[in-house]
Amino acid sequence: MHTREKTMKISHGKLVGNIAALVAMIVMLVAPAGAQTWQLLGKSATIPVVVENTACNSSTDTVGINAERTLLLICQSGKWIVQGLGYGQTWQHMMGSAVGCAGVRAVNVVCTNTTGKPISVLISAYNPGSAFTGWINVNGVGMGVVNGAANYVVTVSAIVPNGQTYSLGYGAGTLYGWHELR
């Protein structure tokens, strides 16, 4: 923690900055049972015990923990939510769906993750007759580039943070499957 101390701040009794959620999780794991107030940089910080899907004030509330001290929650859009990938999410078959996209999911159709949580995208494609390359673009960055031989199915996957765009990019071929953990 010594190398991170310079980047942590406390503002109005709350942790702030990019490191806030990580520090809150670490503090939650090492704090004495029942504790809600911890000393950081010589100042007190309170991380409240909260209940998922209950109301919070998005302009003043930041992070909270559940009563069992096993989950970190953030205040988003006026309610406490668990931010972790997979929590409260299921795998969904998205072929033929235009939810969150500029059209039905297909090569180069841009989608935006508006779920409020990170999602996992898993796309399969094949090309009968010739080799091809495929990838997922996340905010314009090619991720999970794969090369496929003729007549073989290849699969690419990526984690897409909330609010970021994603699309499938590849040469000639056929979309075989599109699944998302959302």
Image (tube, grey):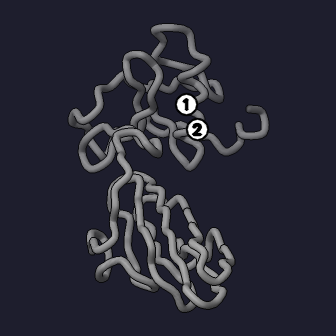
**Residue 13 horizontal side relative to residue 98, left or right:** right
Q: Position of residue 158 (x, y in %)?
A: 55, 62
Q: Which residue is mark 2?
A: 22
Q: Is residue 120 above or below residue 96?
A: above
Q: Can you tell which quarter of the image residue 8 is in?
A: top right
The Cα–Cα distance between marks 1 and 2, rounded to whole angstroms, is: 5 Å
Q: Can you tell which quarter of the image residue 36 is in?
A: top left
Q: Residues within 10 Å of mark 1 (few under 14, many from 20)?
A: some
Who's the residue at 53% across and 71% down the image? 138
User: Nearest the camera: 25 or 114?
Assistant: 114
**Residue 149 horizontal side relative to residue 91, left or right:** right
**Residue 3 horizontal side relative to residue 154, left or right:** right
**Residue 104 horizontal side relative to residue 27, left or right:** left
Q: Which residue is mark 1?
A: 25
Who's the residue at 57% across and 67% down the image? 156
Q: Amino acid at mark 2?
A: Leu
User: Nearest the camera: 93 or 21?
Assistant: 93
* CB within 8 Å, label 1 to label 2: yes
Q: Can you tell which quarter of the image residue 79 is in?
A: top left
